[in-house]
Amino acid sequence: MGNLRFAPDFSTYFTVLGLGYGNRHGGIVMAPAAMSIDEVLCHFKDLEDPRSEVNRKHPFVSVVTLSVMGVLAGASGPTGIATWAKHNHEFLRSLLDLPNGIPGKDVFRRILCALNPEAFQRGFASWLAGLHAIAGEQLPDGMRQTYAVDGKTLRRSHDKKNGLGALHLVSVWASQCGITLAQVATDQKSNEITAIPQVLQLVGLKGAIVTIDAMGTQKAIAAQIVDGGGDYVLALKGNQESLHDEVVDYAIEQMENDFADVKAREYKTIDTGHGRVETRHYIQMPAPKSLSGLNKWKGLRTIGLVILTCLRDGKETSETRFFISSLAMGVKQFAKAIRSHWGIENSCHWSLDVTYREDESRTREPNARENLAWLNRFTLSLLKQHKDKQTVAMRRRVCGWNTKFLVEVLTAQGG
């Protein structure tokens, strides 16, 4: 793997940047809730170098760290990472072990193609755990974390000539913290049912509320979440035909009866902006004992619905969605879980499409495209932890323009 090397006068470097430092066990310590560059590098110390031992001119850990920094600064692939690094070579050589200078684009390409995506993701596990712990401590007392599980297809990543379908990723998004905790790749959207249990195995579920769209509404997935110490809120559509129809019929019956025979709870929110008014009416009630297959859904305690009404340009549209859940009665928590789930589309997938232009990626090598997708999600998580008032897109631009700001984001300063 090569020996890690750090700048001899590293403390001076951080003083110039205006970042706190100190001494602990001979290492550099940042201000509270932050890391030092040596701690960043150490996250990859157990990641196995996939290259042959011949001609390892560039230390593996340095190449991986440069890849993270390059994507954080706006690069979308090996060429962009290498170009950014060459334009910042003096800064990077003071920071990393680069005995033979800045690696060329082919070095980054070979490593990203050779790295096993699962092993690469595991290399970030302790780093993610630290970010997640810090972000979790900032949540209001009593607020439970919501993990939104959803899939996204990289539309231009296919290679029909060689029989390679577009990359489809299933991710776990910690909604309140803005962190992607894990991802699993599939070759098509229909395989989400098998990918969801795999990705849930990669995260700790204890105490979390897991939200999943209708494709993931499966008995085995519900049991996995409950067995892991979490709760679920699962959407219902036609894929669970009899259950969906029974819940819809029961809910409508109770609404028409003004909930005279059931202890229902209601909650309403009104949001304005972008020329529209959105009203969300949440209703939660105990799961009826008459529900067929009730005992087959582990932990099922409540059912619920949300009626979304949107008024725009004088025209009103309405949509109703139905859910099953292991949550106890508590309509505000139920509502927050549902709203949080939409965060993976609005805060994660939208940013990947607009800020990272991920749908335009033409990387076709299977390992490389999955590893780059993970770097996108991980660096987006880093950007979201910085608490300045700029947009995520602007933060990423500033990382490319200003190495001081890049170090702040990389080491969790400014959080």
Image (spheres, rainbow, N blue to C red):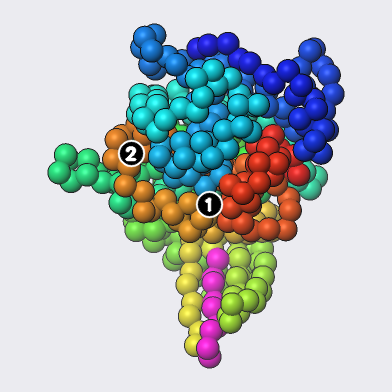
Query: Residue 73, relative to residue 59: is it above or below?
Result: below
Magenta span: chief secondary structure: strand
Query: Residue 341, relative to residue 204: is it above or below?
Result: below
**What residue sits 58% from the left and 11% below the top?**
3
Q: Position of residue 137 (x, y in %)?
A: 77, 39
Compared across the picture, whether 34 is left or right of 96 comes to right
Query: Residue 145, relative to residue 341: is it above or below?
Result: above
**What residue sits 80% from the left and 35% below the top?**
16
Indicate yes or no whether the magenta region holds residue 294. Answer: no
- Which residue is situated farthest in the left direction here? 161
- Quarter in which the C terminus is drawn: top right
Q: Which residues are magenta?
A: 306-314
Residue 92 is at least partly visible in this image: yes
Residue 40 or 200: which is nearer the viewer?
40
Q: Which quarter of the figure has residue 311?
A: bottom right
Mark 2 Cα-neighbour bin, 10 Å: few <14, some 14–19, many ≥20: some
Kind of residue indicated by mark 1: Cys
Q: Which residue is mark 1?
A: 348
Q: Which quarter of the figure has residue 243?
A: bottom left
Dot 1: element = helix
